[in-house]
Image (cartoon, coloured by chain):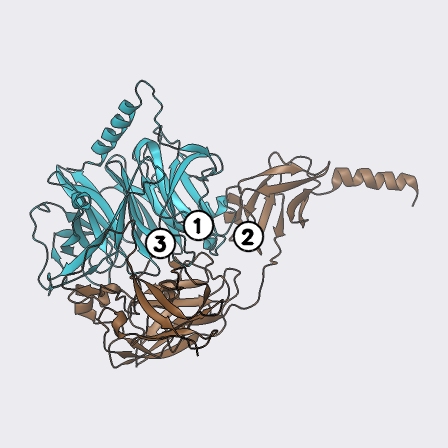
Amino acid sequence: MRPAIGIWLFFGSMVFAEPTAVWRDHQLVVLNAPSTAAARVVVASGTEEAIAQRPAIAGEWKALGREASAFLPKYPFQPGGKYRVFFNEKTKFADVTIPDERDKTRPVLTQVFPSGDQIPENTLRFYLVFSKPMSRGDVYSRIRVLDENAKAVDQPFLIIDEELWDADQKRLTLLVDPGRIKQEVKPRLDLGPVFQSGKKFTIVIDGNWPDSNDVPLGNDWRRVVTATPPQTKAPTPKDWKIVPPTRPGEALSITFPVAMDEALLMNCLTVLETDGKEMAGKITLDKQETVWRFSPAQPWKNGDHQIRLNWKLEDVSGNAIDRPFEAEELPVRQRQPQVKTSLIPFAVSLR
Amino acid sequence: MVRSSRWLAGVALVAFAGMGFSAEKDNGLKVGTAELKSAGTLAFGPDSILFVADTAGKSIFAIDTGDTKTGNTVSKIEKLDEQIASALGVTADQVIINDLKVNPATGRVFLSVARGKGPDAMPAIIKIGDDGKPVALDLKKIGNASVKIGDSNLKKQVVVTGLAFVKGSVVVSGVTSEEWDSSLQSIPFPFTSGNKGVGVEIFHGAHGKFETKAPIRTFAAYDIAGQTHLLASYQCTPLVKISLDSIKAGEKVKGKTVAELGNRNLPLDIIIYTQASKDYALIANTTRGVMKVSLEGIDKIDEITARVNGETAGLKYDKIKDLEGTVQMDKASGDKVVVLRKADKNYNLEIVPLP
């Protein structure tokens, strides 16, 4: 190439090259635009007219040398989202699609509690546990309860606008509409309980439900449950079967006459050593949340131990230790600051 | 009579008197980043301070909106969700509007928003500018203070369903993910470390036979015969009155059912207003539209304790057809109401006369 042509091409590109926008080094970069003073970036979805009228995304421009500028948005770009950069005039623009590099492996619904296929008529709470963070915003349309005729039960769950997720958004709490549980209130008088005793129901979780990276669960999840008579008694330790360990590494177990709330079982029972100190160990649940097991991190020692019971422990119907879900007279308790607990003794005598 | 504006003025006066000759009020707010993890239920307090319930961060934030001068407000904004999404750089399906409140001092509309639907969703507080354009408050440099609610268990969540500033305290109702709880928290403001206020359990009974803990869904503060009450809705019963004075006395706090408004229905928002010397509650519902409930005689009305055989019982109401589709609402200045209504796939904001 002769030098004269090279120079011509160089200046030619400076004068005639159209401004454009690209995604480079994780930034939206504008090339060949002499100034970004009047440029704006908008979301490029919908009709051409809608895009043209859209207000600019908040953010600022940063010069990258003479011919390039990066747009630094106040809020990060949406992965997979399409954005339009309008240059000085409305008619001159360039579109950029942000690459979606998020984890696209399928989420899995790993557990649903209560895990049994028999649930009391007055079951209050369900937990859904997922392998990955899920999307929020319309969970109540993703979960259905079908009766024996495959007809969806009308509004079975309490709708809480912000939804009851844990911090990771991998665990959702669903409360059955308490108006369908509480006796003598209008919703139940008119419509009856959600899970009528003696009948079969199918819980269906929508396979189209996407995780937070827009990957759906895949297939619908289903479980057939049979409703049993309501559980109205407050749980009491007198009815529990405590089996102390007989070997140094063996688990301590408690068997309950009814299924207990999974989350509270993991939190409300603590094992104390002979000197009253909390023992480290692992809690596992078995037999549809009717068995609680504690495997100690260090071997057991002979002697008197205790289980500290937090009275917040509930069964699956919301009956707590001294307070059933409903009663003729419930005790008043100032919530703060104290937590009510009691101690259940057990002796370890190793073989 | 609606007392909200009067007690607001009263609180401001007390705060001012406490500061001697200084015009600066010490609300305990410090300029810096408001570390909100989410932005949910809202309530305005004194001096244009906005209280924001942060469910993910298990906190209540007080934020200085700086919105102190009155201005013009537009009467309608079409596709507000899309406009907010545009300002936040996403499509409308990635925006969740959690709450809407009007600053009683200026009449401007504020909204709490989640940008995104995953655990990394970003919170935003949106102010509607006088040109009708939504603008996100800069949460990195703003006067703020916060107080923690709930415990540190990461799996356990408390969703704040109702929030109000009542006579110097922030009143908070919520629903808990792992406990059948019905506590109503009353936190003194300015926030001080070590004083999270009192928490009491709210009970409810039908027929006076059975009672249960009853989490509150939404509420508005209202003076009945000179005593502070909450006009509230439970998950199972549309309208109850709860005396706030008994919270201090440490007695059993029980809501009294004053209206049954029909089935398959949940109230979304309650506002209280006075029209021609009479008080009304305007209630937006999930399935039964907007109702205007006359509060005449609420001080004397008997609690509904007998079975309701018909559709409704208790306080009388009119259905307001013009406001159908309302999902959020608050009282605007000048005898108006601001509503967020669903229209097709989007949400429109409208400021219309109170019915």
| Number of marks drawn | 3
Q: Residues within 10 Å of mark 3 (few under 14, many from 20)?
A: many
Q: Which residue is mark 3?
A: B158
Query: Which residue is more in the foreground, B90 or A11?
Result: B90
- The residue marked by circle 3 belongs to what chain? B
Quadrant (top left, top right, bottom left, bottom right) of the N terminus of chain B: top left
* Amino acid under disc 3: Val
User: Vertically, is B260 above or below B226?
Assistant: below
Give the alpha-carbon distance from disc 2 to disc 1, as whole Å. Answer: 14 Å
Q: Residues within 10 Å of mark 2 (few under 14, many from 20)?
A: some
Q: Which residue is mark 2?
A: A78
Give the alpha-carbon distance from disc 1 to disc 3, as whole Å. Answer: 17 Å
Give the alpha-carbon distance from disc 3 to disc 2, as whole Å. Answer: 28 Å
**Residue shown at the point (81%, 37%) measured from the top left:** A11
- The residue marked by circle 2 belongs to what chain? A
Residue A290 shows in this picture: no
Residue A115 shows in this picture: yes
- The residue marked by circle 1 belongs to what chain? B
Query: Which residue is more in the foreground, B334 or B219?
Result: B219
Chain A drawn in what color? brown
* Amino acid under disc 2: Gln
- Looking at the image, which residue sits at the far top? B21
In percent of width and height, residue A252 lies at 40, 73
